[in-house]
Amino acid sequence: MNKFLSLLIKPILLIALVLLSAAAFAVEHSAQLPDTLPENLNWQTNNKDPIFADPNALRGGRFRSFITSFPLTLRLVGPDSNGSFAGYMRANNLSLVGIHPNTLNPIPELASHWAFGSDGRSIYYRLDPDARWSDGRPVTADDYLFAMEFMRSKYILAPWYNNYYQEIIADLVKYDEHTIGILGAVAKPQDEMLFEYSISPVPAHAHKLDENWVRESNWKIAPNTGPYQISEIRKGKYIEFARKKDWWGNNKQYFKYRYNPDFVRIKLIRDLNIAYQYFRKGELDTFPLIQPRLWHKKAQGRIYDHGYVGKIKFYNDVPQPISGLFLNEDSPPLNDRRVRYALAHSLNIERVINTVLHGDYERLQTAHDGYGDYSNPNIHARPFNIDLANKLLDEAGWDTRNAEGIRTKDGQTLEIRITYYSAAHNDRLVILAQEAQKTGFKLDLQLLDPSAAFKQILENKHQAAWMAWSGGGLSPRYWEFYHSENAHKPQTNNITNTDNPEMDSKIEAYRKATSKTERVALAHELEQLVYEQGSFIPTFKVPYTREAFWRWIKLPAEYGTRTSDSLFSVMGEGLFWIDETDKQLTLEAREHNELLAPINLEDSRWRTP
Amino acid sequence: MVGYFLRRLLLVIPTFIGISLLVFTITRVVPGGPIERLMTQAQLGGETGGLTRSQSSGSTLSDEQMEELKHYYGFDKPLLAGYAEWLGKVIQFDLGTSTRYQDPVWDIIKERFPVSIFYGLSTMILTYLVCIPLGIFKGMYHGSRFDSLSSAVVFLGYALPSYVIGIALISAFAGYFDWFPLGGFVSDDFAEFGFWQKTTDIFHHAVLPLIAYLAGSFAVTTLMMKNALMDNMSADYMRTATAKGLMRGEAIRGHALRNSLIPIATSFGNNISLLISGSFLIETIFNIDGIGLLGYEAVIERDYPIVMGILVISSILYLVGNILSDICVALVDPRIRFGESRT
Amino acid sequence: MISLLSNPVSQKRWRRFRQSRRGFASACILLLLTLLSIGAELLASNRALIVYYQGHLHFPTYGSVISGREFGLDYDYETNYRDLQTSFAAAPEDNNWLIMPLIPFSPLESDLIAGDFPPHAPSVSSKHYLGTDTSGRDVLARLIYGFRTALLFSVCLLIFNYIVGVAIGCLMGYWGGRFDLFFQRVIEIWSNIPFLYVIMIVASVITPGFWTLLLIMAFFGWTGMTWYMRTAAYKEASRDYVMAARALGASGSRIMFRHILPNSVSTLVTFVPFSVASGITSLTALDYLGFGLPSPTPSWGELLKQGTENMESIWMVGAVVTAMTVILMLVAFIGEAIRDAYDPKQFSYYE
């Protein structure tokens, strides 16, 4: 539904990668883009893949949704631009190339064609001459030149963007009004280059870059390239978007039949329980129901039984967050592999799933799930097994138990401190801690607020961290998490402090490889090594989205796509539409308490085994 | 007497400096400030997996970049210099700029004043209107069944968290019966309404939150009133009054009542600062943009200029309120003469 | 202290206290509840009270963990006594038996009923008399243990606040002057620091334990008592007998300890019930907001929070709110009775 909500609702708070400076691994920085466009470029595009929108879609109506905190800014970058509302703003900020949600092939967005340079690092784009800003001006190569200047500027107060546009994207050159070239810092496989260098333009005519930029553009509605633009803001109440009357993308192959509501009103409702009351009354059109409690207990009653409101559970196939328990190998007794294995065998994840999670979540088997070929399907997480854990611990010398039943060794008790940052996870951890006592582990639960927890973890002061890194990207990343270069030092993603020469060499090979088969083979081997290292214990995944919607909200025949993380993201995929006649019928039926056919949908087309 | 109050007024200054310096120090010393928040936020991704590009979560920051951030948030100055600068601005009625809203703190607070004062004042008036008679009644019939029963009701209201009351009220009267709106201070189209419509709109929206506010506020004042009355009923002058032949009711009304109001008057000063606080839980549920919620969010999100701004206003109100309650007490109790003996 | 209790005034007060039927009954109930919560392990625990196994008696309630092997089970970890009871009952010829407490669950233990997801509704057959919370822990057991924690917490808090308050307050009242003025300012500053703010910040940086929390609360709690003691001492100091004692050449400390303290402290007793109640409510409020004792400590606030997040399962909110109301009422009635008992000029307008 929106970023903040999914943050609340999804099983884990997601923390994105602290991408490490690619420069540390960078090859020669000296290479440049040629001054003139190379002659022999092989321009590619994609108009062969099937469209994923439904031609029956009806345009019109007002879609009503909600956010739980009012945005602090309308800027796309700078302080507080990452809040719950940012998703709506970013969705209207198109990039060069998109990804087909079913085939995962590139599809045109602002660029109609693209071509790869021979050095493996450069990529060329031809901009779609039809592309327009919301104020009518064409999108040109100059907007990209300004984007580079803008993103590298210190006035935007976004140091991470600054770094990205300096260290990942080495250069950008304009060849003519509609042709640009981008040079990456390192050689990469072509699909990764398309994906990562597909940046967004910034309209030079709408920004004045100086030290007041952050404040002055805070509430300014900047021109955008997407289908919607903000039409009204009532601070502390709602924000309304209107669909552009003649949006340039209307008849483009992959934009057609999408973004159907004419208006989108996003209301501020601070409390989820109250938001549900709005939905129940019909003042919101859809409601996310990922939480087991909402799905099983709250979303019941007349409006569902009489068919006014439908429920859908839709399996998707996207990179899953790397969620689980990260063990710090620098912190004894976790430096002992046997203890790490024993801990994995002592965590009764199944029991948590089948009780407090209502059997809804699934066990995450490996660190990298949902990456298609890259994921290694032969690895299975260590199951809860008391005998195995006991055996390992006895071997490791933890063979005596104290009066509380906790194992001891040389006067030390087998205590593991678990750092976590979501009070909503109390009930899960409490069950795990209790079950772990059976094998003689004592788990101390330390709840901190997210920034304090994150700080502690990045400084390697944790013993075990209960957290989730967001997945994303096209292929798994190993260097950040497991290379010894990042071990034993603060502010890196290697929070397990894995330091294994065998893994190092494989990771380096993986980073250098540009052929997919080679990378896939290496990823499978690396995943096996991660499993043997035992410093990451995978926990849960939620490979689906669950939502409730009023009957007048219509979904395409296939409901969603392989990568739909929400079926009703109006500006994301925007596949649904509003049927006004059905709305009247449904409201009348509700008035007269008539029975309509209940809607209970489940789709597991994209469910991965 | 005037001299006493003048001295009290002057003493407000060192106290105010003490309070603000202390809190200012806390904001500086405690980790998790706006910069750490920014860093965590940049690394916090909301979307569940999916095909996300993470340009915003870049590499670790260089020292230079950190310095720039510190400069932006004003953390580059030493503690006392920073405080002096802040205080200097406050004297010129400049509370600074919010680090989250990018707007002047005073504008943000000012915007929320009417809402908070409306609820604060209504709650205060209704509380006194209910609690004073109830307390008197309970005092007069101490130990009776009414006394026990009303205690039970008042304590039940006190023990129920306002969140529970709020959700229950909304689910029943706004969700199920549709008698009241689901929240907000006014309707979305408030600006287009006429005067009469505006008034009814405000009250229509206010009924449920007011009940939630009131439920928890009866216990303290009622008991205070009852206890004060009972203290006075056993005083010597009441004995005299009865000896004079006054009926019980007359004696209470004529003598005990006025004296029993003293503690209520003393607490009145404190309540002035409560006027602008408000409960963030109730404001969250009913979608009211009040000061309580603003302050709570500012602390959670480490928006220090707002934290300090609210502190300035609430502590001034509190300090002035203290003096006011002294005046109230002097008005109600003729025996008290401030400043004549050592106080 | 002994003399305080045995002197005729105290005895008279005690008599008067007992005469207030409502207050006395409340005191008895509260005392009973306190005693029950102190012996909570005998009331609610997953350990058996007595196990008779192969001719030997075991008392597992207090003391170390007894491994399942002791009772012929095939595991090393702590015996599951409820299962043991079932297996004993299934084989009556072995003559083994055990007695479980009334509530056979520990407050930390998740009892997950097959075929149902927690929170489980109250039921006599499952022995969850008030149901379970979202992790399947017994609500009644958590209520009892939570009460014990809260009570212990507020008693410690009270002792600390009274010691600091009485000491500083007495000095302020007795010495007056600059000392008084200085501490007046300190108190004013103190009572203006947003208490919740400090707690929130501390809780976000460390996980506060019992003693950390107590320290923070005490840090802010002492001002009220100090203020009261200051007034009381000030009043006493200007009384004739103190003047007389001074004229007779009594030293400052003697006046303080022999005259001022006993006379003002005796009135402090009237505050005790309210201080205890406010300690319990503030701890509950903090736990409710998530800034209190760490998980999985049983606490009323945490239960209340779960309850408000799961209003469909009304038994959680219901249990805590009822318990809280009862405690507050008991305390109020006791407080009134104590006040009546201390009132020297009991007037006949109320009996």
Image (spheres, coloured by chain):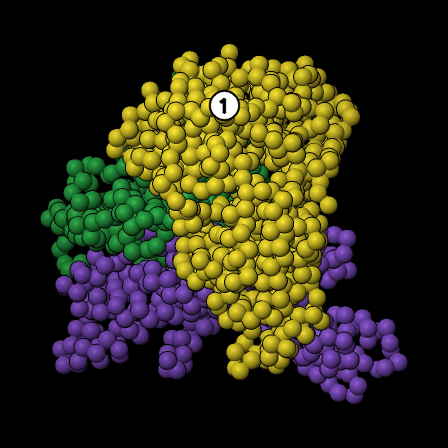
Chain colours: A yellow, B green, C purple
Residue designated by label 1: A111
- For residue A291, which quarter of the picture? top right
The image shows residue C289, relative to residue B127, as above or below, that is below
> Which quadrant is the C terminus of chain B positioned in?
bottom left
The amino acid marked with disc number 1 is Ala
Residue A553 visible in this rendered orientation of the protein: no
- For residue C94, which quarter of the picture? bottom right
Horizontally, residue A159 falls left or right of residue B147, namely left
Q: Residue furthest top?
A: A246
Horizontally, residue A432 falls left or right of residue C81, namely left
- Chain label for disc 1: A
The image shows residue C288, relative to residue A28, as above or below, that is below
Q: Residue at x 65, y 22 (%)?
A: A48
- Residue neighbourhood size for the residue with mark 1, other residues' Cα within 10 Å, grouped as few (<14), some (14–19), many (≥20): many
* Image position, residue A419 (x, y; %): 50, 59
Q: Nearer the viewer, residue B128 or A580?
A: A580
* Image position, residue A598 (x, y; %): 76, 29
* Image position, residue A200 (x, y; %): 44, 28
Q: Residue at x 57, y 50 (%)?
A: A322
Residue A545 visible in this rendered orientation of the protein: yes
Q: Residue at x 74, y 57 (%)?
A: C113
Horizontally, residue A324 falls left or right of residue B303, namely right
